[in-house]
Image: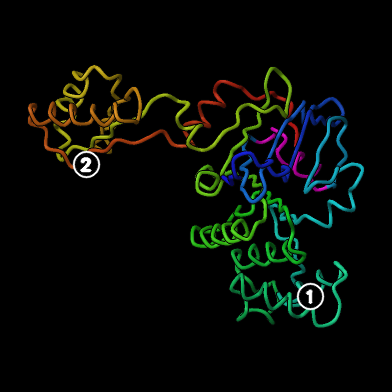
Amino acid sequence: MPTHPPGARAPEAAIEVRGLRKRFGATTALDGVDLSVAPGTVCGLLGPNGAGKTTLVRILATLLTADGGVARVAGHDVAGEAARVRGRIGLTGQYAAVDELLSGRQNLEMFARLYRMRGPAVRRRADELLERFGLQQAARRPVRTYSGGMRRRLDLAVGLVVRPAVIFLDEPTTGLDPQSRGGLWDSVRELVLAGTTVLLTTQYLDEADHLADHITVLANRDGTGGRVLVTGTPSDLKSSLGSGYIDLTVRHADQLVLAAGALARTGAGATEVREELRRVTLTTGAATAAGTALLSSALRALEVAGVEIEDLALRRPTLDEVFAGLMDAAPAHAGEAA
């Protein structure tokens, strides 16, 4: 996270949301959402379908009007200064919004002109973005011939034509293969290094874990949609479970019961046996120094029992496990919002 010298005034938040509310008929999409995103960081916005993620993004991008509350983006009020906000942001949705009949270069040049660039500046900006996203070789090909990953990279490039202070990425890697996802992650990291603030909604928990400095989880609670369930760094959220795991894989499946008994005698917690994986999992009190000491104790107990070990590791909870626990504690309302 960015820091500032002691005694210096903290920079204004790139995104500041207070008490934001939105309803669609009888459905509450957002119910008093608060959010603050520091400049030059990535905020991961998570939540189940219907939690209000896309609604929040559309309000911040001035595509929807909130029913109540205040939202500021890049120092401007989204309701009273919508034109100024639009001049400082980029938006990439879940599906590529480029023209498939045009080439990659033509798409970029068209959007540059829509943003009132003129003359040589249009071509220069297209050249910069084609190079940045590795699309030079395909620059003159119709977009309909692009792979899914290439289309997503072009869509992101289009969102950067005006060098936005803030960019909204609404599930940008949906449907991409692992290699294309990794390439897009690299592009996002480059944006942040250059000072751009990113608000990322994603259905992939590992994506948020890799990219986000800070995570906010939205959920439907108490029959009402769009409330902030929890917020914090990925590390904070993982630590909130208060437990870690020792994963043991035995060399021989017939030693599973013996191994489970040896781990159970450590008194650390419950064991779970996965026969098909030849694995025993022991829940520990914490994935910290105490957990490391327990790992040593577990190793000694297994040696005494004569268990042949193929693999033994101490791990922290994953963000997927944190998310699953949060959703179990906050069941979704039947009437979903956007």
* Residue nearest the observer in this picture, 1 or 185: 1
Q: Quadrant of residue 127?
A: bottom right
* Residue nearest the observer in this picture, 312 or 9: 9
- Whether residue 56 appears in magenta in the rendering, the answer is yes
Q: Are marks 1 and 2 in contact (CB under 8 Å)?
A: no
Judge the density around disc 1: few (<14), some (14-19), many (≥20) Cα neighbours within 10 Å. many
Residue under the point 86% across and 35% down: 66
By what rule are the colours in the image chosen? rainbow
Residue under the point 30% across and 20% down: 270
Judge the density around disc 2: few (<14), some (14-19), many (≥20) Cα neighbours within 10 Å. few
> Could you say where residue 223 lies in the image, as x and y percent from the top left?
72, 19
The Cα–Cα distance between marks 1 and 2, rounded to whole angstroms, is 54 Å
Read off the magenta span: 49-61
Q: Amino acid at mark 2?
A: Asp
> Could you say where residue 224 lies in the image, as x and y percent from the top left?
74, 22
Looking at the image, is 295 positioned above or below residue 133?
above
Which quadrant, please, contains the N terminus? top right
Looking at the image, is 328 positioned above or below residue 94?
above
Residue under the point 33% across and 30% down: 288
> Could you say where residue 42 lies in the image, as x and y percent from the top left?
61, 47
Could you tell me which secondary element the residue under label 2 belongs to? Answer: strand
Residue at the disc numbered 1: 109
Residue at the disc numbered 2: 311
Left or right side of 194 for 315: left
Q: Quadrant of residue 334?
A: top right
Q: In front: mark 1 or mark 2?
A: 1
Q: Amino acid at mark 1?
A: Glu
Among the two numbered marks 1 and 2 on one chain, the one whose residue lies closer to the N terminus: 1
Residue under the point 19% across and 28% down: 298
Left or right side of 304 for 153: right
Looking at the image, is 55 positioned above or below residue 221?
below
Which quadrant, please, contains the C terminus? top right
